[in-house]
Amino acid sequence: MVLSLGTLSSCSDDFTNLDPLGSTSYENFFQTEQDAIEAANSLYFYMKDEDMFSRGFFWFINASDDMVTGRINSTADNIKNFNMTGDEGYTYWMYPQSYKIIRRANDILLNVPDMEISATLKNRILGEAYFMRAFHYFWIAHTYGDDVSGGVPIVTEDNMFDDAGSYSRPSSVSENYAQIIEDLQKAYELLPLFTEYSSDDLGRAHKDAALAYMAKTFLYWAEYDPSKYADVVTYADAVTNSGSGRSLYDTDQPELDFRLLHSHRNNWGPEYIWSVVSGVNDGSKLPGVALENKGWGKYNGWGYYMPTNGLYEEYEEEDIRRSVTLLKFGDEFKFFGEDRRYQSENSLSGLQFNKYMYEYQFEDAIGTYVNSNGNNPGTIYNVPLMRYAEVLLMKSEALIMQGLNGDEPINRVRDRAGLPPVSNATMDDLKHERRVELAGEFANRHFDLVRWGDAEEAYAQPLYGRIHTDRSNPDSPFNVSIIWPARDFDPATMGVWPIPNQVVNSSGIAQNKGW
Amino acid sequence: MVLSFFLMVQANAQTTVRGLVLSKSDMNPVPGATIIPNGKPNQGTTTDVHGKFSIKVEANTGSLTVSFIGMDSQTIPYGGGAELTILLEESLNDLDEVVMIGYGTSKRENLTSSVSSVTGVDQISSRPVANLNDFLQGNVPGVTVMQQGGDPSQEGLVVIRGYGSLADERPLTVVDGVPYYGPSINPNDIESVSILKDAAAAAIYGAQAASGVIVIKTKDGAFGKPKVTFDLYSGVQRATNLPTPLTAQQQANVYNLAADNAGVDRQAAHNADLNPWGQVNRTNWMDEIFRNAAIYSANVNVSGAGENANYMASFGYLDKDGLLQGTGFTRYNLRLKADFYLSDKVTVGENIYLSKSNAVGTNSSSSYSGSIISALYMPSAAPVYDENGAFHGVVPADLSQFAGTYGDVYNPMGLLLRPTVNNPVVNINTNTYLNYEIIPGLSFRSTFSYNVINTENKQFNPRIPELGRTNLQNYLYQSHSTTNRWIWDNQVSYQRIFGKHDLNVTAVYSSQYTKYDYYSQEGRGFSSEEPFNQYMGNASEFLTPQTSVYEDALTSAIGRAMYNYDERYFLTASVRRDETSRLARENQSSYFPSVSGAWNISNESFFQSKLINSLKVRASWGQIGNINSVGYYSFDVPLGTQTVVLGEGATLDYKAVYAGQQSNPALKWETSESTNFGLDASFLDDKLSLTMDYYIKTTKGMILPGLEDLHQGTSAADVNGGEVRNRGFEFSAGYFNNFGELRFGARGNFSMLHNELVNLDGYNKSNVDFISHTDNVRSTLAPYRSMVGQPLYATYLVPYLGIFQSQEEVDSHTQDGQLIQPNAQPGDFKFQDVNGDGRISDEDRIFMDSYLPDFTYGFNFTFDFKGFDASMILQGVSGVKVFNGYKFTALNASQSGYNLDNRVLDAWTPEHTNTDIPRISAKDDNLNFGTSSSWYLEDASYLRMKNLTIGYTFSETLLQGLAKDSSLRVYFSTENLFTITNYSGIDPEVGGKGLDVGRYPLPQTFTAGLSLSL
């Protein structure tokens, strides 16, 4: 009477064997040229992410003496004050997202070499993977790694499938730098020059970017090993001589040059090396993030990163870069077709970064020059991460640090700004030039102060702003007063930031000492 | 489901007696009722599917005893050859009731496993509940309904005997014998509900039953003339206990004080001279967004049964406005159900359910843009509309310079009313069956079910031009999904009684297949926002469409044998083999056994008790495979796709492909194993009955995403990674009695639950013994962690010790002579340095309680007196902790300049120290708010008056002229009349894992209705 289960279950074998639907599976991927290209495209996904090169790493740059948070926001204030729990969402994403790109690069480096696709394309894609892996390691290595707590775990195609929890930190960030250099060297060999790309492929990794980041990696490495300064010079020169014509944007009209340099008109100009490709639909939000809170009622500016009076004062009086970089009360500018004179009820410093504001001048800017989405307030200006002027300044710094004469590169930067040359430039000259040329950029003033050993002294000073008696009046007088109290910076531990707790908890790696 | 029960009939009779057995309450025929002549069971028979019987008896006169499970037995005389009509009454006590056990029914008395019947289902039509889940709250021990707030697009989640996994657990719903996955059915269609709680009971439904099974039987036609029932109610819902935002002037004062306390400049916008506009109170935003919301429900039910058929048709309409403006839920539904008795042996039937619903909810879980929290954030100085009738911003356009001060705030009325939202869900579910009685006792049944669910989601979002969170992009988001599913069950049952041996054997082969297909598209840049233009073709740019698709197949072979000896010793055993498409081929199938037994002590001859009428002990053990926590393709996860920005034109249309999650071809079935010990008893002439159960339910090989080492750069593969144990005790009792014309009933239930993560074996190879959860408040407070030895989703927080009342207290909070909280000032929080390292950090967290209640209880009282009836449901939970993340922004002047809850006026000052709200400041140097501390954790135990209903049924004579056997009842009903709780938020039932940032509260509802039966 009782039917056996076996009889009942006989006919089911094929019924439950369903192949995944929806998209390719890992096993079936990496077959065609299109697969390889789409895998390479995925390397650029986080470039436009709000928590990478819009705010993200900029929260740490905000710790510098060039700017203050700008509006009430205790979370951001506490980051600037090195008063962190490691749970801050603002600074959570850079670390894990960098490893996501590293993973994608590793997948390419593991699978693409065996693909039967054209050698040119294969080289380019492998080069893109090496570069993007190195680029993300570069950012997290110096942000989270030093020689006290160690570097950040090195995950490559060789150990990418290791067990969760098995990755460990190298004893020093120098090991990261060595691996980054290795990757960038390969990227340099494999990649085309950016001038060889078609317009559709602009924004992909290219030779000059690899060379310039080699120079910068060596510069950071030199903090621990001064012998690396020589390499900085080598690779800075390699950029200059790469054949793509990298040079300063310099038409001998200093003010106009510096203004147009920081605009979409120079997105792919001679000074371009590496930037966040930005369009009206997506890209870096930094221009809107750093814009007047609520943009005088015209646009949803977020009102962060207001420059300090200290930065204003750093400029030489005749330096035209000051007015392009900063707006002070009474300065004239165009905003959505309207002539305005700068004033702000919102800026806590009484100043505003002007560098990223070029695209907001046009009357029909919305949807053409700037994103219409107030939650994504970017422009079509490709926010620079590395430009040729920085390559020159790195070379100059490396020469000076080796006791050699660094005048030539620094003076080219000064000349473009219409300033007289300096002779026998010192590190003080170099620090000044780096600060004013690269103010408010991802060149990273905060980390400069850290690696120069200047942070403790600099941050022991309060930050000043210009407090106007009538903030609605562009002509009202002001007092220079303290807008940010002095901070305690412990150079032994605060040169690096706390690794997000979620990372520490999920992997078992050690938190940075002191955090 | 119609099952016939046949007994062997002896053949030496002389007279034939014929008759019909009907149920007195609904005049339905009672098939399968036992007819015993003159006390001689060996001469008995049973009624056929029409309730008819014919029996040959030895004597011309005598008595017949008629009995049926769930009914009181009757003994009546016969003689003279007349056809008898016997009306059986439903029995009062619970023990005789018929319980649906899955592929069959059983007398409660004969159960060996833990099955609870939902009580009072006949009242479901007079309670303003949109679905059964809401009705279940407080009804059944061990069944916890986690209300997801009052959002009309959400419904309560049923948790049976605790969380067994980290996945979204839902019990399986079975409607009229077939698993049902569509949207909630019309509660009015429901006749009875039972809940299968332990593995032995749920085993018959296997792979989808690990979280328990809700077995629903819908109404049938009653024998006799067609019956028409109208049920109508309407009412109003309102919000209670809403927070009060600061007035305009108070907001300015608080922020000026915050600036002073932080040592920063006051903001111009809060200066009465510069911004007099900001000092004038214009709007109470809470009053604006909440409304008295209407609810209407209408149901018509036509049913009947004749010689050869039984039919039921019902139509229902529900229109439930949400408490928040712009939200609501409507549903139309139709059920057509019929059984055809083609012959004595063959019955066929169909059951078709059609529904169309449209739910418009709102986001109340984001601390940035939730509707309710936005009403708190919006300055009270701002009016709702400007002079042109457009939504007003945080400030008027000509005061745009002050907009930044008030923070990034949406006009909450704009959030609720501006988008055009349409979310129709069309559900068609059909069941057809054939039942064939091959020989008496042996029957075959085949059931085929087909379900199509079409879900659309269309939301047009106009530009937001006003100041606050200006967004000059309009967009249309439109998606469509189709789910097609079929289930085919084939069942063979054999039942026979041999003397004192009662055997019931069932074998089932079930297969089901599902295909889901989803497509969504976003278009931007509409030149006109008028209704005529809100269609995708009018967008000026399109984002890359998103698609999602899966197939899912499952087959099961099941055998079950139920045996009892003399209704004293009971034994049930089952074994099943499940095979799923969600695992790699070599792991697709597995076997799951169960066994249960009972001893009905009161049926023993030695058992003689006046006090105790029945007494039974039960024990069960079983395993069920659980497939619900496995992704559809965990063994081979499809690659992810994205779009990136590249090229000179910087367009967002470069397709990118990447590995988003790792695969695990070695993944195996997760097993839910449960052991249950139970006792059923009744006392005092069955007036008092009680049931107790103790259970241990263990999830073994729990499927969860493995440890996601963030250095790996992809989500970890699903793994069999741990064991969760729920232990609990459940008790329910019922008392029913008549005092003259007063009928009184009382039921009570309570349950205790202890949930524990036993181990995380397999979760990782690096000895990480906890899971960090990322649920958070504004990406800053992350309160949850599941650790071995702790409950799932326990809160993990830094202990809050109070407020520093003086500088001395700050200075004396030291470790090795160093200040533990160097940034603290009087009025700041004091935290415990748990690890003694001299500072407050993530490492000072300790485990605290979770949102899953330790103790739930419910009481239900009913009274009937003459035509009046009254019923009352009280329901409560205790040992529940809510992380009140609302306070992070609502009481914190260092966030973004938002308006605040007026409880911030109770903040600490040197003069006002008896408070737990820290000093007001524009900075949070001491991380008062920025620390995930126990200050946020609140006891959310509560006791609610869930329902109170008073009705009156008019006497039959009054309606005699209308139709025979007609009745009319009118009633008044209220839900959530009061709630007793210490929780400081709007409503203690916040839903989810217990994280509250101003969640949509449950309504208090008042309805009046009538039920007319003709």
Image: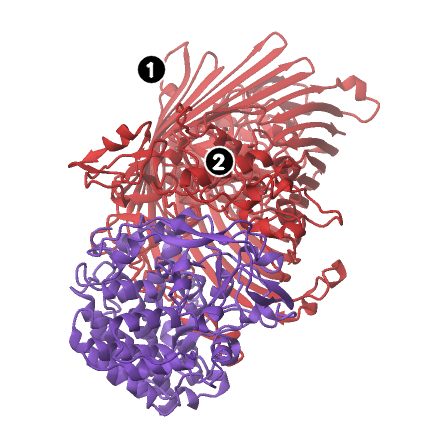
Q: Is residue A428 visible?
A: yes
The image shows residue B3, relative to residue B980, as above or below, that is below
Give percent across and percent down for residue B7.
Answer: 50, 33
User: Which label number is shown at residue B606?
Assistant: 1
Q: Chain of mark 1?
A: B
Q: Quadrant of residue A301?
A: bottom right
Q: Residue B303: horizontal and vertical position, in percent?
A: 71, 37
Left or right placement of residue B937 versus residue B1007 in this view: left
Q: Which chain is red?
A: B
Q: Chain of mark 2?
A: B
The amino acid sitting under disc 2 is Val
**Picture quadrant of residue A138:** bottom left
Whether residue B560 is situated above or below residue A418 in the rendered picture: above
Characterize the local packing of mark 1: few (<14), some (14-19) or many (20 or more) Cα atoms within 10 angstroms. few
Q: Which chain is purple?
A: A
Q: Label 1 to label 2, Cα distance in Å? A: 43 Å
Front one among A331 and B703: A331
Residues at discs 1 and 2 both on one chain: yes
Identify residue for label 2: B145
**Mark 2, secondary structure of its residue:** strand
On the rendered image, what quadrant is the C terminus of chain B found in?
top right
The percent coordinates of residue A143 (x first, y second) are: 29, 63
**Secondary structure under the numbered disc 1 in the rendered image:** loop
Image x and y of residue A500, in percent = 31, 54
Taking depth in this image into account, of B399 and B166 the one nearest to the observer is: B399
Q: How many neighbours does mark 2 have within 10 angstroms: few (below 14), some (14-19), or many (20 or more)?
A: many
Residue A452: quadrant of the picture? bottom left
**Disc nearest the viewer among 1 and 2:** 2
Q: Quadrant of the N terminus of chain B?
A: top right
| Three-letter code, disc 1 | Phe
Q: Looking at the image, is mark 1 or mark 2 earlier in the sequence?
A: 2
Q: Is residue B498 left or right of residue B7?
A: left
